[in-house]
Image (tube, rainbow, N blue to C red):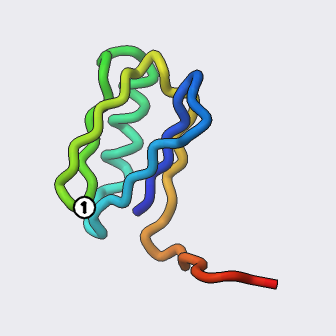
């Protein structure tokens, strides 16, 4: 599953590739509790073991993609 997080005052998104066995509902609950401000920092670990912390007050949106999405590569005309 791919996750993209928009951050206030930044033109770049945070992009994470999660492990294939990542529970989508668990991630949704974690994001919802972060946006509800019951936690101050959203911690996520990608499939390579990289830990990413995002201050919840700076999150503008979260896009949960699918692990089955086809990734486009190369140039198109």
Asked whether, in this view, residue 51 is left or right of residue 32, the answer is left
Q: Residue furthest right?
A: 77
Q: Tell me: residue 75, above or below residue 53.
A: below
Q: Tell me: residue 35, above or below residue 75.
A: above
Quarter residue 38 falls in: top left
Q: Position of residue 28 (x, y in %)?
A: 41, 42
Q: Residue at x 30, y 18 (%)?
A: 39
Q: Position of residue 27 (x, y in %)?
A: 35, 45
Please, what secondary structure does the residue beneath circle 1 have? loop
Asked whether, in this view, residue 20 is left or right of residue 70, the answer is left
Q: Position of residue 6 (x, y in %)?
A: 55, 36
Q: Which quadrant does the N terminus fall into?
A: bottom left
Q: Residue at x 49, y 40 (%)?
A: 5
Q: Residue furthest left?
A: 49
The residue nearer to you, when weighing 75 against 27, is 75
Q: Which quadrant does the C terminus fall into?
A: bottom right
Q: How many marks?
A: 1
Q: Tell me: residue 21, above or below residue 60.
A: below
Q: Residue at x 40, y 34 (%)?
A: 31
Q: Residue at x 49, y 52 (%)?
A: 64
Q: Position of residue 40 (x, y in %)?
A: 31, 16
Quarter residue 41 falls in: top left
Quickly name the residue at label 1. Answer: 47
Q: Tell me: residue 14, above or below residue 21.
A: above
Badge 1: few (under 14), some or many (20 or more) residues near its Cα, within 10 Å?
some
């Amino acid at each position: 599953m791919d996750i993209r997080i928009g951050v206030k005052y930044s033109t770049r998104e945070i992009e994470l590739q999660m492990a294939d066995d990542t529970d989508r509902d668990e991630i949704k609950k974690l994001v919802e509790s972060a946006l509800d401000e019951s936690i101050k920092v959203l911690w996520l670990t990608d499939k390579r073991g990289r830990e990413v912390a995002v201050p919840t007050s700076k999150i503008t949106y979260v896009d949960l993609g699918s692990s089955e999405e086809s990734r486009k590569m190369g140039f198109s005309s």
